[in-house]
């Protein structure tokens, strides 16, 4: 099974485009036209970030390759699950971190900021993610927060959330 849940008989050769080695958009278009566009990895230097192409030939960033974790043999990109969670009408923000699991390797834990005056429960989040995405992607743990912690760079502090998840959810 590949990154998108498609059952494949042979290994897929990922095509790579290194932005740091090319001048710009025209080179990217020529590259995509010359390879299998279903499996393209957009790169900048050592960064290898998977993307996917939809039926209308639009390319989408899937997630950071270095954030990826394995859950029961499936590659989970936190950004992909975060975008899915944020489609729920009650979710304002979501951050996903891995939690070690003896059986699955790691499982997703989500920290969610709900929209004001819109109640939401773990069961609603689980049902939503199971109906809108692959089963392996649903968060096994959810904590609702008023706001997400920020690091000194004013970005979400994933390290703090990872430590919190390890303390609170580790099985």
Image: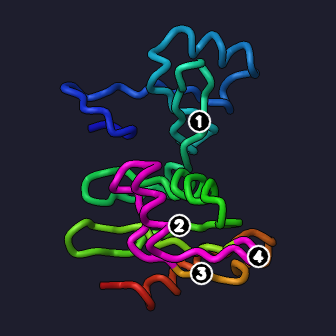
Q: What element carries label 4?
A: loop
Say which of marks 1 and 3 sits in front: 3
Give residue 43's mark. Answer: 1
Residue segment shown in magenta:
115-142
For image coordinates 36% across by 84% down, the residue present is 170
Position of residue 144 in the picture relative to residue 39 (left or right): right
Marks 3 & 4, CB-CB < 8 Å contact: no
First of labels 4, 1 by sequence position: 1
Marks 4 & 1, CB-CB < 8 Å contact: no
Q: Using a 10 Å C-alpha cutoff, classify the residue at mark 2 as few (fewer than 14 neighbours), some (14 to 19) or many (20 or more).
A: many
Tell me the quadrant of the picture where the C terminus can be found.
Answer: bottom left
Q: Distance between the residues labelled 4 and 2?
A: 21 Å
For image coordinates 53% across by 26% down, the residue present is 53
First of labels 2, 1 by sequence position: 1
Q: What element carries label 3?
A: strand
Say which of marks 2 and 1 sits in front: 2
Tag 2 residue: 96
Give residue 116's mark. Answer: 4
Tag 3 residue: 144
Q: Distance between the residues labelled 3 and 2?
A: 12 Å
Residue 135: within the magenta? yes
């Amino acid at each position: 099974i590949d990154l998108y849940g498609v059952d494949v008989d042979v290994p897929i050769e990922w095509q790579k485009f290194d932005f740091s080695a090319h001048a710009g958009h025209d080179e990217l278009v020529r590259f995509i036209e010359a390879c299998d566009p279903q499996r393209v990895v957009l790169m900048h230097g050592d960064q290898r970030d998977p993307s996917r192409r939809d039926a209308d030939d639009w390319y989408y960033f899937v997630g950071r390759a270095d954030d990826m974790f394995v859950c029961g043999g499936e590659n989970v990109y936190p950004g992909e699950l975060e975008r899915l969670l944020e489609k729920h009408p009650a979710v304002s923000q979501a951050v996903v971190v891995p939690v070690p699991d003896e059986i699955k390797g790691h499982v997703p834990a989500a920290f969610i900021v709900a929209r004001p005056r819109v109640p939401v429960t773990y069961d609603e989040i689980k049902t939503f993610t199971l109906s809108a995405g692959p089963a392996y992607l649903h968060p096994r743990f959810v904590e609702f927060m008023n706001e997400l912690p920020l690091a000194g760079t004013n970005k979400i502090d994933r390290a703090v959330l990872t430590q919190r998840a390890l303390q609170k959810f580790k099985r």
